[in-house]
Amino acid sequence: MSDRTELFGAALSRRGFVKTGGALLATFAFTTAEGQQKPGIADSLNPALPESWIEIHADNTILIRTGRSDFGQGTIFTAYRQIVAEELSAPFEAITTVVSGDTDRTPDGGGTFDLLGGGTPNIRKAAAYVHQALLSLASQRFGVPKDQLTAQDGIVSGGGKSVSYGDLVKNQKLSLTIPVKGDVASMFGLTIDGNPPLKPVSQYTVIGKSFPNSVTVSKVTAKETWVTDVRLPGMLHARMVHPRTLGSKLISAGTPDKTRFPNAQVVVKGNLVGVVAPTEWEAIQAAEQVAAGTKWSDWKGLPGHERLFHFLKEDADWKTAHVATSKTSKGDTAATIVSSPKKLSASYQLPFFKHAPIGPTMAVADVRPDGLVYLYTHTQNPQALRSGIAHMLTTSVDKVVVRTFAGPGHYGRSNGGNAGAEDEAVILSQAVGKPVRVQWMRPDDFQWSTQSSAALAEVQLGLDANGGLSAFEINHYMPAMQDDRLVGAILAGLPTIPAPNEKGSMFGVENSLHDAWVYDVPPALLERAYGTTQIGQSSSPLNVGLRDHSLRTPGQYQQNFPRELAVTEAAVLAGADPLEFRIQHTRDKRLIGVLESVREASGWKTPFPEKLTDNGVSRGRGVSVMLRSGSYWACVAHIAVNRSTGTIKVEKITMSVDPGIVVNPAQLKRQVEGGALMGVSMTLLEELRFDESGINATDWKSYPILTMADAPEVNVVLINNPEVGRYGQGSEAANALAAPAIAGALLDATGKVARRLPLKPEYVQAVLKA
Amino acid sequence: MTTVTVNGVKREIQAPGNTPLLYVLRNDLELTGPQFGCGMAQCGACSVLLNGNEVRSCIMTLSSAAGKEVTTLEGLPARWAKQKGLSEAEAAQTLHPVQEAWIAEQTPLCGFCQNGMMIKATELLERVSSPSVAQIKEAFTSGVSPHLCRCGSYTAIIQAVQRAGTAMAKRSDA
């Protein structure tokens, strides 16, 4: 072959020959503003490590690397392998190794969101480039033009000859250089810049099949190395003594009893207090004693849970942040509503929710004498965490390595990097000169982690003489929803990125329209989003307050609940069936498709045949829809409500989803089932209670979540829609659909509307009596 | 020094007697199946079998486990092999039917709680061969506390328990 071959913006070159083995390594180079390529930056502390996305080995095995970490849904180990195998025309099983999420072992960074990258994640493009390279190699070997070659199951054929991918790379050192753009250590990482030809969907053989998650076996047999299992030589165990309130400053730290805890050591840095000891049990007991003897200043700067919505409505400042108005907005809603024969005005309220992972956050840090930092954790965004740690230590990102491991699912809390304990582990390790494992206890996790922001929405709508929507106005109010500051750094007085403010930070205080209008635009539509600072942040001497962070469907959850419940209310006002009302208000075939699918699958009938039963129980069903990341969702909830106690039992959840191309039906089904139940949990049970000083939740009794006893039957319908030509994503949407569907079902069952989450018995009882 | 039989092997343990069993298992014996979830017996992530009963190792002291038999997730295959009288060679090749069912049903999402779920399932299926959905729900939500899953894998757990129950009943007939 020639030394260098241009391939759709990438460059294939042979670096030399080797006697045994051989590989094609896909590395990267930056595209500069002038469009010229320069060598990639050294992202690895060990320059001997190949910065590759994909390796084709002489033995026909394939290795893939992604900076994204698996977040418990297995997408990295199922869908990613399928996507690569498909683009390469190689067997799924040939991909024997998946390296993910380690900052020194993966090329691109980025977070575990938008995993399918709008249909073309980096890994798909990388695979498509590698495929082109393999075809080029075969073309030169056979003397046959590329367009006369076919590839299947890892073998290229043409001109009467065939060769395996392994044989194509055997005894050679080949390098494929792919153009990329972006900043690897940013939250969004690098993006492959270039458009290699992609395999036509009609030729798919791997995508669409239910391959099992390769990590399941190791998790089920206790062979997985969880982050909780990381042990380093000489490592000390630590427990934190967090401030008494979200605004308390340290007056004096307690001391451990040296006779009982001879090896325990207290580390104090600013308002950060930690206790380290050689054994975990000594660290726990000593920390309890230190906590009891530690004095903190008092602080009362929060409105308290009971006054939350009053505070959001009357006291919060919504004027400093830019008010976002949706592009779909049009017409004069106020005038149209005034002249509409039927109208509705209502407000909707969502509490703070916790991410509430089953295991509290923990991390192991090893700050070495030469200043290198190794951090072992479960994070959604290893490169962003790396960047935050480097910032905290005022060092370069090259000095920080983040390695990721399986951990308890926390659904977005470390979207910008940290889940809570990482920076504290680094600070303590630096202080004691040894590796330190920081494990938060259950109360730490409820009280010192971020939460999903509370929100308020005001809706006004009008119906025309035919019962159609004439106008819809919705104003969303939500405090800043993503604070990526490292909390340990804040407490220790070390540098962090700014708190969300009007000037920005990673995400500012501005709110935006997170839930796209899915119906046909009515004659008048106004959708606005108001933002403000996090509650208590500015008055907290620590600049902490109630820190917020994205949870699964960040912002969209807060906006979809009021929108969808209001649409159901509009249908009832029109005397229409809420599901049929939605179909009548759209010409979008995919939206109609999921609605018709969920109608059939849920056994939705009008009128509802079994609404009233004896012994004070009423039944009802409700519907909701969402468009997220190119996927269409519809949900029907069937509930039974006890009219005297207000207790809601969700009997059945039915979900239909059209994501375009379904990559892995069995895995998607499990993801949707799980999301549906988390959604039921949030709807019925979850709200973060807080007083004027801090968070009151300390355990699973003060922040209860759904148990198996109350888990409804869940039916999932997957609509494979290959004509869409892309794989939609956003299985997390499943968690958002339950709330408006269940509230709609309550309206159906009782004629009463409950517009505040959660739908706890005492609240529902009050709504039914009103 | 405390003696506990763990996964069929007698272990002499140096840790103080008031150490919760969970830390002994994870840190002294390097058995990492049980996980730290709450330290208050409220979630079930740390469950092990103690003389065949599901207990929360996060609140059980080492002393109170002295002289008893502890089975962790790691010990489920050997427990099954012993119950079925499998040869050593067969035992090395086998998983507990509960683990096999968890894999076949692709039950875990993040999987952090599944240790306790599988331990609970094993306890249940050793007593009730083909439990109904109601019996499964009762088992997983009664006792010291419900077994909690944040990812909402309850549907998959119920299906896996039923699959494992069927498999265990079949092999008992054989």
Image (cartoon, helix red, strand yellow):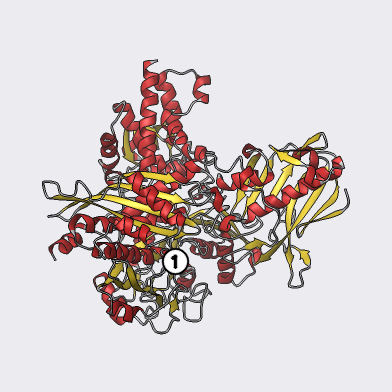
Above or below, A239 relative to A721: below
A90 vs B155, left or right, is right
Q: Residues within 10 Å of mark 1 (few under 14, many from 20)?
A: some
Observer able to see residue A222: yes
Above or below, A94 relative to A42: above
Above or below, A715 relative to A579: above
Extreme top residue here?
B174
What chain is tagged by disc 1?
A
Which of the 4 image quadrants contains residue A205?
A: top right
**Which quadrant: the C terminus of chain A?**
bottom left
B79 vs A85, left or right, is left
Q: Position of residue A234 (x, y in %)?
A: 55, 52
- List the residue tagged with mark 1: A516
Foreground: A416 or A578?
A578
Residue at 36 percent across and 60 percent down: it is: A584
SS category of the residue bearing label 1? loop
Which of the 4 image quadrants contains residue A28?
A: bottom right
Q: Position of residue A409 (x, y in %)?
A: 44, 52
Extreme bottom residue here?
A320
Foreground: A657 or B38?
A657
Q: Position of residue A509 (x, y in %)?
A: 45, 76
Residue at 65 percent across and 69 percent down: it is: A396
Q: Position of residue A392 (x, y in %)?
A: 55, 71
Under mark 1, the amino acid is Ala
Residue at 48 percent across and 49 percent down: it is: A72
